[in-house]
Amino acid sequence: MPAASTHPSPSPRTPAWLWPHTLSLEAPLVAMLWLAALARMDDLALMPGVLPGLGLAVWLIYLADRVLDAWGVPEAALSMRHLFYRRFRWPLVLGVIPTGTAYLLWLALWVVPSGLLAHSLTQVLPIALYLVLYSVTSIRVRRWLLQAGILLLLFFINALPIPLSVRVTISLLIATGTLILISLRWHENLENYFRKELAAGLLFAFGCTTWTRFHTLGSEGPENWVQLILLGLLFISNLATINAREANSEENRRRAQSTLRGSIALCLVALLAIPLDYLPATLLPLSLAIGAGLIATEIVWQNRHRLSPEAFRVWADIAVAAPALVVLLLPAHSTACCQ
């Protein structure tokens, strides 16, 4: 799609199948499907507010990410989705995002269990750091936001009703880490140390497994971490291949291919570890679903030259979402018999 397109919004020239992508609706749908699929495989009932809460949180994060990505970038250099967020940034920043955040706070404070709220708050700082470090293009603005955010966090921590020694310890750790980050200028070249798709994939997997981890707090088994790692492999592979297709450089293609093949190999290791009793049999349905998603992603990747970047993204997201949808459509005894 030519980046210099001059239409101000998804107009009639934009295909209908691109609307979910342009409006960032595909990520919330994938997150909700996988959250529901994990609950189905783990035989956990979903309480009211959990699914819409996760979907809305993911959507707001994606809105903020794309608004920040497009901020200050010339329109001629933007893709279709970023052009949309550049043109409509003020309605999004002043209207949609505050309204969505207010509704999300209502769900968090009065609908979902209080324990789940506390569990979910642990993800706020990593997500905020992700947005500042990966989405803000200006080094100067990034440094300012990082400093302001850390000061706000320190104020919040010291307002909590916890022992003074704990508050001081946490504050010193955060302040020291921030000083190291800024003094060594790691935030200016973060992509060289930790790829954006790796950070985003792990955060996405962490959000999708929140409900499962909330129900198994204190468990000594490896199930939670293996679930997180397997889902992370799927999401990281998805983001790496999409980025490589859009960037269209040899280095990105090699990195995406090695990421995808490595993820498939690790998934096979998990599948082999289950019959050898190194991993519990309860992980078999998830391992099979992740394996199917990775193979589908490989098929889409091999056909990338036949697809436009927009079509490739849509098919890559379908490859990630389809296994979760299949799990939800299967009869309950089908997943139980695999365990």
Image (spheres, grey):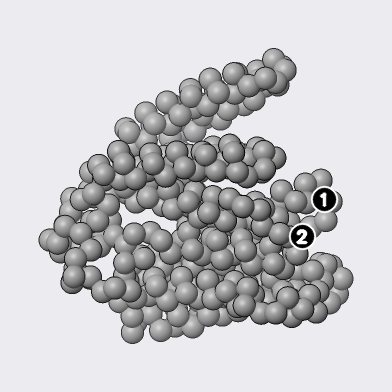
Q: Residue at x 63, y 73 (%)?
A: 328
Dot 2 and dot 1 residues touching (CB under 8 Å)? yes
Residue flagged by tag 2: what amino acid is it?
Glu
Q: Where, quadrant-wise, is the C terminus in this rendering?
A: bottom right
Residue 151 - label: none
Residue beneath label 2, please? 223
Image quadrant in which you'd find residue 188: top left
Q: Residue at x 79, y 69 (%)?
A: 282
- Residue 174's place in the image compared with 112, above or below, is above
| Image coordinates for residue 40, horizontal then vertical, percent | 69, 67
Instruction: Tell whether 111 sits left or right of 102.
Output: right
Front residue of this view, candidates 193 and 225:
225
| Image coordinates for residue 118, horizontal then vertical, percent | 65, 37
| Image coordinates for residue 55, horizontal then vertical, percent | 50, 55
Name the secondary structure under disc 1: loop
Name the secondary structure under disc 2: helix
Residue extending furthest left?
A: 6
Instruction: Tell whether 181 sits left or right of 188.
Output: right
Residue extending furthest top?
A: 164
Q: Residue at x 36, y 65 (%)?
A: 21
- Residue 318's place in the image compared with 103, above or below, is below
Instruction: Tell whether 199 sits left or right of 189.
Output: right
Residue 182 makes an appearance in the image: yes
